[in-house]
Amino acid sequence: MRINNKTKIDLTIDFAGIKLKNPVLTASGTFGYGEEFADFVDLNKLGGVIVKGVSLKPIKGNPPPRIWETPSGMLNAIGLENPGVDVFIREKMVYLRKFDTAVIVNVFGYSLEEYVGVVERLDDVPGVSGLEVNISCPNVKAGGIVFGTNVSAAYELLSAVRKATKLPVIAKLSPNVTDITEFAKAARDAGCDGLSLINTLIGMAIDVRCRKPRLANYTGGLSGPAIRPVAVRMVWQVAKSVPLPIIGMGGIVTGEDALEFMLAGASAIAVGTANFINPRSTLDIISNLEQFMVEQGVNDIKSLIGKVNAG
């Protein structure tokens, strides 16, 4: 890609064997299955699309209200609503295969067997570039313990997923833990090819006049710019702890936001809540990155990964 006659910009990234034309992806749950944003965004220009979470069977999700705006962010308790993996394969992937863009499927379940079942169904589906495994779900067979907040449970789950597919496996880590590096190491030991972080922080909002929670589910996941400093810090910590490539996310709105994550150690970034504010935010961020590189005399985006001057 040429910006002018003197500067040749290389935005390409090889993420765990997945070829990305640029490091800008869409965060799961904020971009639907691509088609919902097609009137605003040329999917061919994105580095990749991480689709809304897919489970073994259809899930209706939580009752409303399911979203509440907060200062510099939002709470959501959608409840992982989705049509199930079979409908995803039959309908959603047919549409996504029209584009020359990497498709990473976010998968989840409420037992180890459910995760494995979804992964096995997706293993040979044409057009699927990789799997992002959302481990922030309760294991109903183990008394509701959340996979993503118990190191042993996370390792067991990710090991089973790794054995069930030939596709690249990317573990999406929860920030709601004491030490996220321990979970990154568990993912590495389980054979994962990459990491995504961070998932949403658990939050709550209350209507003081009605004295009731704003969300029907009481608590929800906090996302948006308010969580970005936490996310950048966790990406930096994890990047120093394990050699796996990282997709950084959490409140990215501008190209400079994206660059914070890359300098902290992320090889790619995912845009989430910003899609609700500006449907074209992903394209704007790609343009921001190109302009930054021209201004700074940087030819290859890869040369910025992990280059924060932090001693």
Image: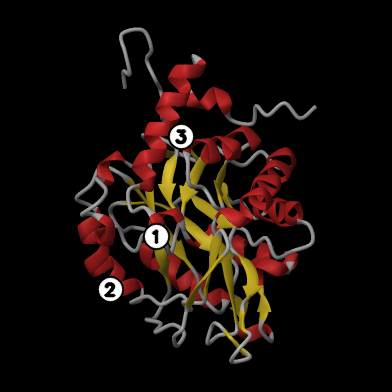
Name the foreground residue: 94 vs 208. 208
Q: Which residue is mark 2?
A: 87
Residues under labels 2 and 3: Cα distance?
A: 30 Å
Name the foreground residue: 258 vs 269. 258
Disc 2 residue crowd, few under 14, some 14–19, many 20+, Cα 10 Å? some
Residue 3 lies in quadrant: top left
Q: Earlier in the sequence, mark 1 or mark 3?
A: 3
Residues under labels 1 and 3: Cα distance?
A: 28 Å
Name the spot of residue 240 as percent of width and height, x first. Answer: 73, 38
Disc 3 residue crowd, few under 14, some 14–19, many 20+, Cα 10 Å? some
Residue 118 lies in quadrant: bottom left
Residue at the (66%, 38%) spot, across then down: 243
| 146 relative to 249 in the view: left or right | right
Q: Is residue 261 above or below residue 53?
A: above
In this orientation, does residue 11 appear?
A: no
Residue at the (31%, 22%) spot, across then down: 1
Say what amino acid the circle numbered 2 marks. Val
Check residue 109 in the rendering and tell me which mark sits there, or answer none. Answer: none
Say what amino acid the circle numbered 3 marks. Asp
**Label 2 close to label 3 by CB (< 8 Å):** no
Residues under labels 2 and 1: Cα distance?
A: 25 Å
Q: Which residue is mark 1?
A: 276
Q: Look at the numbered disc 3 and give the secondary structure of its residue.
A: strand
Label 1 vs label 3, nearer the camera: 1
Say what amino acid the circle numbered 1 marks. Phe
Q: Which residue is mark 3?
A: 14
Q: Earlier in the sequence, mark 2 or mark 3?
A: 3
Quadrant into which the C terminus falls: top right
Q: Is residue 282 above or below residue 215?
A: above
Q: Look at the numbered disc 2 and give the secondary structure of its residue.
A: helix
Residue 276 lies in quadrant: bottom left
Disc 1 residue crowd, few under 14, some 14–19, many 20+, Cα 10 Å? few
